[in-house]
Image (cartoon, rainbow, N blue to C red):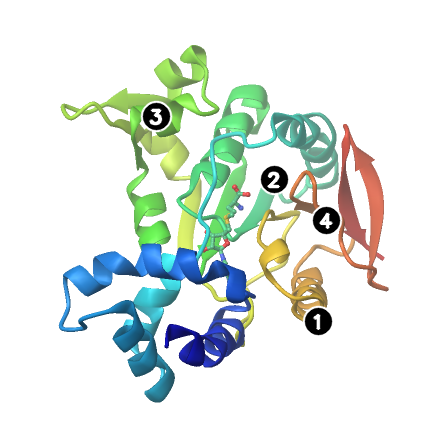
């Protein structure tokens, strides 16, 4: 019976989140939505999905959508990409921005914040000469739950151990009484986190020297990928700005971006 309502539900998911699921993901829907059933008046995943497909989009829809999003992330995920940012992209930005003494980074689809904090730690550790510069790392995501976690900057030992070595752990985190790691205040102050659904109407307040859009386009269909990329490209500084995507992602062809090597992976510049 669930199968009857799934096509319409998939359509809602694609329309509002851009994410494409297919019939083979029924098990994922059932397992991820069980917690809602246990704490609601719905007696089954079927009745929940039926309700969602027959009612206007509201808070419950978004609660369900968030449970179906893949939020996988880690500190310094694909370390060679961060090496490329450190060795190639940041030095170039520093050279070009000597007059303004600013670095503006947009971390789209930031998930629970590890990516943004990785860049903040990288800049703080390897570029001490930027102490009097204004550095802003703006993280955005469609998931309120992930943004809340990013803003809190509190991570379990398991999350920190995935990507952070002892030196960085000692220098940039403090341990709370529950055994969780708190990101240090100066690193936190380099970041802001706000809600942004890449497939809805949106605008950003400024153009960025570096845009990170990693491991999110893969969930979108080709048409959505191209339209998101076109919009994102408008916010990359046209003189020297760069776009970094996931280490194994190859962008669809667009007329507005050119690809360059970045230590085993690629970055893109607006033409
Ligand atoms: C797999 S995680 C990648 C996180 C991080 N960029 C990384 O590479 O480690 C994908 C992220 O994209 C976000 N996302 C999915 N659809 C989105 C949309 N339509 N707009 C903005 N963010 C979205 C999810 O909430 C999730 O946090």
Mark 4 highlights which residue?
A: 241
The front one of 261 and 250 is: 250
C-alpha span from label 4 to label 1: 24 Å
User: x%, y% of residue 142?
Assistant: 44, 61
Name which residue lies at 44% across and 57% down. Answer: 69
Cα separation between marks 4 and 2: 15 Å
Q: How far apart, in angstroms, are the residues tagged by discs 3 and 1?
A: 37 Å
Q: Is residue 19 visible?
A: no
Where on the picture, by quarter, is residue 159?
top left
Along the horizontal axis of the image, is 231 left or right of 67?
Answer: right
Q: Earlier in the sequence, mark 2 or mark 1?
A: 2
Residue count near mark 1 (Cα–Cα under 10 Å), binned few <14, some 14–19, many ≥20: few
**Which residue bears the numbered disc 2?**
101
Q: Quadrant of residue 86?
A: top right
Tell me the residue at 59%/42% (across/down): 103
Labels 3, 2: front one: 3
Q: Is residue 27 left or right of residue 239?
A: left
Which residue position holds label 1?
223
Q: Is residue 72 above or below residue 255?
A: above
The residue that disc 3 covers is 158
Secondary structure under the numbered disc 3 in the rendered image: helix
Query: Which percent across, then down, holds residue 217?
Result: 63, 56
The disc, 4 or 2, on the residue closer to the chain's N-terminal end is: 2
In this rendering, would 167 be left or right of 182? right
Percent position (x, y) of residue 140? 47, 55
* Neighbours of disc 4 within 10 Å: few (<14), some (14-19), many (20+): many
């Amino acid at each position: 019976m669930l199968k009857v309502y799934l096509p319409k539900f998939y359509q809602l998911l694609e329309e509002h989140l851009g994410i494409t699921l297919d019939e083979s993901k029924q098990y994922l829907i059932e397992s991820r939505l069980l917690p809602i059933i246990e704490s609601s008046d719905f007696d089954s995943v079927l009745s929940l999905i039926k309700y969602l497909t027959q009612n206007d989009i509201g808070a419950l829809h978004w609660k369900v959508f968030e449970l179906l999003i893949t939020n996988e992330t880690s500190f310094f995920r694909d370390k060679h990409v961060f090496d490329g940012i450190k060795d190639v992209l940041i030095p170039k930005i520093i050279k070009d921005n000597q007059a303004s003494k600013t670095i503006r980074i947009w971390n789209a689809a930031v998930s629970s914040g590890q990516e943004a904090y990785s860049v903040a730690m990288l800049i703080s550790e390897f570029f001490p000469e930027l102490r009097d510069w204004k550095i802003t790392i703006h993280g955005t995501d469609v998931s309120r739950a992930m943004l809340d976690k990013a803003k809190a900057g509190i991570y379990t030992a398991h999350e920190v151990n995935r990507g952070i070595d002892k030196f960085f752990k000692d220098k940039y985190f403090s341990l709370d009484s529950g055994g969780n790691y708190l990101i240090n205040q100066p690193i936190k102050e380099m970041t802001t986190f706000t809600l942004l659904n890449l497939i809805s109407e949106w605008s950003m307040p400024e153009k960025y020297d570096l845009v990170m859009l990693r491991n999110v386009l893969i969930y979108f269909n080709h048409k959505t990928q191209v339209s998101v990329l076109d919009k994102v490209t408008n916010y990359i500084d046209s003189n020297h700005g760069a776009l970094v995507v996931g280490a194994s992602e190859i962008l669809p062809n667009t007329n507005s971006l050119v690809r360059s090597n970045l230590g085993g992976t690629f970055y893109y510049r607006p033409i």
